[in-house]
Image: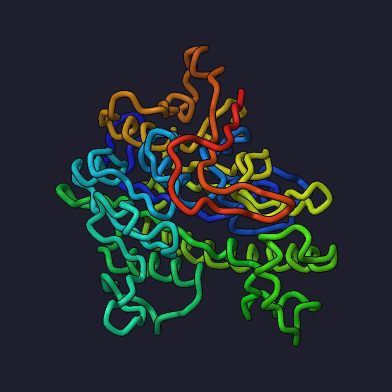
Amino acid sequence: GCSTKPAFDNVLLISIDTLSRQSLRAFNPQAVQLPSLDHLASESIRFANAHSAASWTLPAHVSLFTGLYPDRHGTTHKDNQLLPGIPTLALAMQEAGFETVAFTDQGYVHRKFGLGKGFDRYDDWVADDNSGASSRGLVVPRDGKPHDTRGQDMFDRGIAYLNSREPGDSKPGDRGFFLFLHTYAVHDYYRAHSWTADLVPQASGRDLDYLSECVADVNRCTEDDWDLLESLYQAELLYLDEWLGQLMAVMRERQLLESTLIIFVSDHGEGFDLARGRINHAGRLHEDLVRVPIMIRGPGIEAREERSFMSLVDIMPTVLDLCSLTAPENIDGVTIAGRLMNEPESPSSASRTLYAMEHTYWWDKGKLQTASTPRQRAMSLAVIS
C-alpha cells in the first residue's frame, strides 16, 4: 500500500470515455442530476481546469499511463503501439507490489496497443482467433451471466473482481490493488442501445442505424437528429450513473472507501454544437473536447473545487508520488500530490502551460478524415495557459 501523505492501500482509476465535463453538475450547474456521479463529486477534489492531451481515446489514454504528451509517446494512430522501453503507471505499481488489474471495453484500449504492460490481468474481451467469437482472456468470477453490453459489463466485471477479494481490513503482507476500469458506454450513444432508446420517446420503434453516420459528417443529419443524439447521450449518462452507484456500493460494503484512492477521469469530451460544426470528437482541439472532468477522492483529501491547471499527464507522477515511488525522469507530467493535500505549491507549477495534440484526424468540409498511416508531426496543437 501507499503509506505516506494519505494512507491508502488501493488505487481505483475509472475512465469514462467521451464524458463531457458539461454533463456533470460538479462542472456545470445546469446539467441533469446524476445521483451517483454527483455524490462522488461531493466527496472529491474537482479539477475545474483539467485537460486531456488529445481528443480521442488512444493517445489520451497512453498519455494518462505514461505522463507523456502524444508527440513523445508516439501512440497516435491505430497502426502504432507503445514502444517497449517507455515506463507506465501500471508497470510501476506492479513493481511496487500492487495487484494490477484492468477491465476495458477494448477498441483503442485493447492490449495490442501496449496498454496491458504492467497488468497482472488485462481483461479486454480478447477475440478468439479461430472462431472470431469473443472469448474471455482472463476469467473473473462474476454475478450472473455475461452481459453483451458496454459499460454495464465493465462495472459488472469490476464488481465481480472486488467481490472475489477478501473482505474487510487488509492484513500485513496483503497486496493492495491497482484497478483500472474503462468504458465506452457514453461514447457509443449514437448506437441507440436498447437501454437508452427506452428512455428517449422519439427513439422508440425507429431504425436508428443512420445515426452512426451523423457523428462523422456535420451535413449528414438535421438539427432534430442532433437533438435525438443529445437525448441518447443523456440517457447513457443515467445508465452509467446507475452502474457507478452499484460499484461504489460494493466499495462501501467491502470497507474499501477509506483505504482506496479513487481517480475519476475522462479522456475527452463530445461536441454537440451543430451551428459551429463542432460535433463528435477527434480532429479538433476545442475546449469542449480537451477540457475534461477529473475528480479525485481518498483519505486525507478534502472535497472542494480546485481551479489551478492540470492535465491527464499529471496522473501518473501524482499516484507514484503519493506512494513514495519515483516517477521516470523527463516525463511531461508533474505531481499534484501537494495540491491534493492542500499544501502550497511552487508558482512555476501553478502557472504552467499545457498542451493537447492531434496527429491522425482532421475535418474537411464538415467530414471527419483519417490519416491512413502514422504521422510523425502533429497536424494541430492546442496551447493551454
**Residue 342 appears anywhere in the view:** yes
Vertical relation: 225 (above or below) 304: below
Displayed quadrant of residue 321: top left
Task: Please indicate whether residue 129 sits to the left or right of residue 180 in the image.
Answer: left
In front here: 210 or 377?
A: 377
**Residue 262 appears anywhere in the view:** no
Which residue occupies 36% across, 28% down?
A: 331
Expressed as whole percent of the image width and height from the top left, the position of residue 267 reads 52, 48
Q: How many marks?
A: 0
Which residue, as the protein is rendered here, is positioned at the far bottom?
Answer: 205
In front here: 69 or 35?
A: 69
Vertical relation: 121 (above or below) 44: below
Vertical relation: 99 (above or below) 156: above
Expressed as whole percent of the image width and height from the top left, the position of residue 83 reads 28, 43
Which residue occupies 29% across, 34% down?
A: 323
Task: Please indicate whether residue 249 sits to the left or right of residue 32 in the image.
Answer: left
Task: Please indicate whether residue 109 sits to the left or right of residue 185 in the image.
Answer: left
Which residue occupies 71% across, 65% down?
A: 214
The quadrant of the picture occupied by the N terminus is top left
The quadrant of the picture occupied by the C terminus is top right
Task: Please indicate whether residue 283 sits to the left or right of residue 98 in the image.
Answer: right
Which residue, as the protein is rendered here, is positioned at the far left?
Answer: 173
Displayed quadrant of residue 291: top right
Expressed as whole percent of the image width and height from the top left, the position of residue 319 reads 36, 36
